[in-house]
Amino acid sequence: QVQLVESGGGLVQPGGSLRLSCAASGFTFSNYHMSWYRQAPGKERDLVARITSTGGSTNYADSVKGRFTISRDNAKNMVYLQMNSLKPEDTAVYYCKADYALRIGIYYWGQGTQVTVSS
């Protein structure tokens, strides 16, 4: 069955770094664009970063540009989010999402991993 399993979240001080990982299984990973979203308490789930199926293109929310980097390894069915210079406002549950590149409307979500930025 399809699985997206996030890991790497935790508690970090402002200015610190974390690397999130998302392990994919049950589908042809290289046919899917991959994204990281986040949802803070009482707020909507927002796109953080996205990478195309081949890894050839990325885009980021303005709030994380220059601090976060999305990458993928199609040989390992993994997508990553390197987060540097973390701020308290980055605190949220971070979700991995897979979108089928060949047809709109086919997508999968992971269960999320908590990131808390606090001193």
Image (cartoon, rainbow, N blue to C red):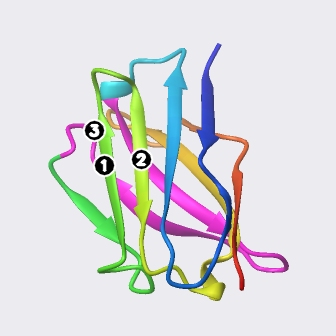
Residue 57 in view of the camera: yes
Q: Which residues are magenta?
A: 31-55
Q: CA distance from mark 2 to mark 3?
A: 13 Å
**Secondary structure of the residue carrying numbered label 3:** loop
Q: Earlier in the sequence, mark 3 or mark 1?
A: 3
Q: Is residue 90 above or below residue 34?
A: below
Q: Earlier in the sequence, mark 1 or mark 2?
A: 1
Instruction: Please give left or right for residue 89 compared with residue 15 in the image.
Output: right
Q: Which residue is mark 1?
A: 71
Quadrant containing the N terminus is top right
Amino acid type of the residue that numbered disc 2 sits on in the rendered structure: Tyr
Q: Are marks 1 and 2 in contact (CB under 8 Å)?
A: yes
Q: Quadrant of residue 75?
A: top left
Quadrant containing the C terminus is bottom right
**Secondary structure of the residue carrying numbered label 2:** strand
Q: Which residue is mark 3?
A: 53
* Position in image of residue 34 (x %, y %): 41, 45
Q: Tell me the residue at 69%/51% (across/down).
A: 113
